[in-house]
Amino acid sequence: MSDAKTMRRMGALVLAVNLALAAGKTVVYLDGGSLAVGGEAVNSFADAAYSVFVLVGLYYTTQPPDFEHPHGHERIEPFVALFVATGVFAAGGAILYQAGTTLLSGDATVTTGFAAVGILAVSGVTKYALYRLVYARGESTNSPALKAAALDNRNDVLTAGAALVGVVGARAGFPLLDPIAASVVAVAVCYTGVEIVRDNVGYLVGSAPPEELRVEIVDRALAHPDVEGAHDVVAHYVGPEVDVSLHIEVEGDRTLFEAHDIETEVMDAIRELPEVDDVFVHVDPKELGEWKADADVDRLARRHRED
């Protein structure tokens, strides 16, 4: 199955699961009035709403390159993930407001049955399975949108657990535990939004990739037998993918054909890295003295040798 189909199917699966859980939690909330269950219902409806956007976004990001987008459409994905974060913050704020109002009023009368316990237990188990599946697919396809959806599912496991504590506490005669649990749910939901923003802003502002990847880029450049050195190595995110530019030093008596072959071989070696999209290699004749010490390259090369 292609990455595009995998991403779309994961988006559809997340939407279907969120809709089913939202419906089940709403029925239980209307029957018993638990704020913790109600907060979970709001959370699931928010999840379903952003899942629609994610699904549409994944459709566009998996379209092949065209004349107006020669590098493809993957750069849309960080924006999709940030939209997810917006929905997550809105849901967390709504839950926190309702729980806070109830705590201040002191009116926390809740009637909960075994249905509330059951729906929250089912939600926790389902969300954990969904988190593992979607995050694995997000890793294999390098999809920020799928990873964002997976992180939300992971935190939904925690919120379901907190809500379950509130429901059980209310049944045991401690009704204030219900809005307290709803407050914990709200904080966890908002933290999910923070994680999503933190993970995706770097894609939009052109941050450097992790040092492990930069070590591998430098090593692949210096591994070529005809490369005497490297400098001005720049790697940065363009959307979820990495663009690389670097200068390599070769013997000046190489023919143009030989220099071209060296450049191509270095470029191909770096481009084999799954995170890398484009590679730009500039060949410098060593004898011209354009080489300059590059402390970052030396440090990365030294770290690779030590590893």
Image (cartoon, grey):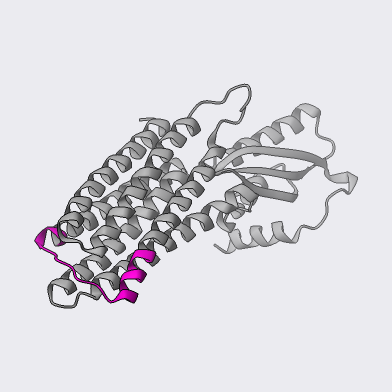
Foreground pick, 107 / 224: 107
Decide whether the magenta segment is chiefly helix, strand or loop.
helix
Foreground pick, 289 / 140: 140
| Residue 166 falls left or right of residue 65 | left
Seen at 31% across and 47% down, the residue is 133
Give the image location of residue 164, x and y in percent. Answer: 21, 66
Give the image location of residue 305, x and y in percent. Answer: 60, 60
Relative to 293, does residue 180 appear above or below in the rendering? below
Give the image location of residue 30, x and y in percent. Answer: 19, 55
Residue furthest left in the image:
114
| Residue 286 falls left or right of residue 237 | right
Seen at 46% across and 43% down, the residue is 143
The residue stretch that appears in magenta: 96-116
Seen at 58% across and 48% down, the residue is 203
Location of residue 210 by image quarter = bottom right
Q: Is residue 106 located in the magenta-colored stretch of the structure?
A: yes
Give the image location of residue 249, x and y in percent. Answer: 78, 45
Q: Is residue 46 located in the magenta-colored stretch of the structure?
A: no
Foreground pick, 270 / 14: 14
Query: Number of labelled discs?
Result: 0
Residue furthest right in the image:
288
